[in-house]
Image (cartoon, grey):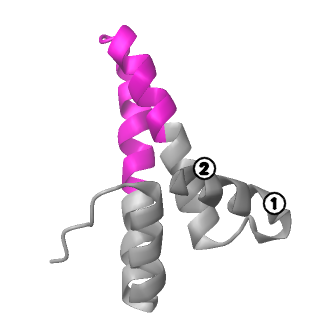
Amino acid sequence: MVKNLFISVISQKEENRGSVEFQVFSFTNKIRRLTSHLELHRKDYLSQRGLRKILGKRQRLLSYLAKKNRVRYKELIGQLGIRETKIR
């Protein structure tokens, strides 16, 4: 339920598509879609490569957000239901 509320709040703010939160949200949707695709098509190596690239982009955005604003980062990963990144 919290995820659906977050999705509706993000999608209503169309002027905010460049924000880190919207980009992470968009990448998370793509990751979930590609993951379900790869469950059916295990040998689709190009999709696997695309998934790895998107995961890397989302990882970089999340680490940027964690450095700049830890509170927004914690809210975002809580609302999207993703694990916290390992900080080196």
Tag in front: 1 or 2: 2
Q: Residue at x 31, y 10 (%)?
A: 43
Principal secondary structure, stretch drawn in magenta: helix
15 versus 25 height, above or below: below
Query: Which residue appears farthest toward the left when viewing the image?
Result: 88
Residue contact at pointers 1 and 2, CB within 8 angstroms: no
Segment tinted magenta in the rendering: 31-57
Which residue is identified by label 2? 4
Q: Position of residue 17 (x, y in %)?
A: 74, 64
In the image, residue 52 above or below residue 43: below
Looking at the rendered structure, the secondary structure element under dot 2 is helix
Depth check: give the residue in front, 81 or 45: 81
- Residue 68 spot, x, y in % from top left: 45, 90
User: Label 1: which residue?
Assistant: 12
Q: Is residue 54 magenta?
A: yes
Q: Distance between the residues labelled 1 and 2?
A: 12 Å
Judging depth in this view, the residue of 1 and 41 nearest the camera is 1
**Quadrant of res 7:** bottom right
Q: Is residue 42 visible?
A: yes
| N-term mark: 1 or 2 | 2
Q: Residue at x 28, y 59 (%)?
A: 83
The furthest residue to the right:
15
Residue shown at the point (52%, 60%) measured from the top left: 24
Q: As shown in the figure, which amino acid type bears the numbered disc 2?
A: Asn
Residue at position x 35%, y 55% from top?
Answer: 82
Q: Is mark 1 on a helix, strand or loop?
A: helix
14 displayed left or right of 6 = right
Q: Which amino acid, mark 1?
A: Gln
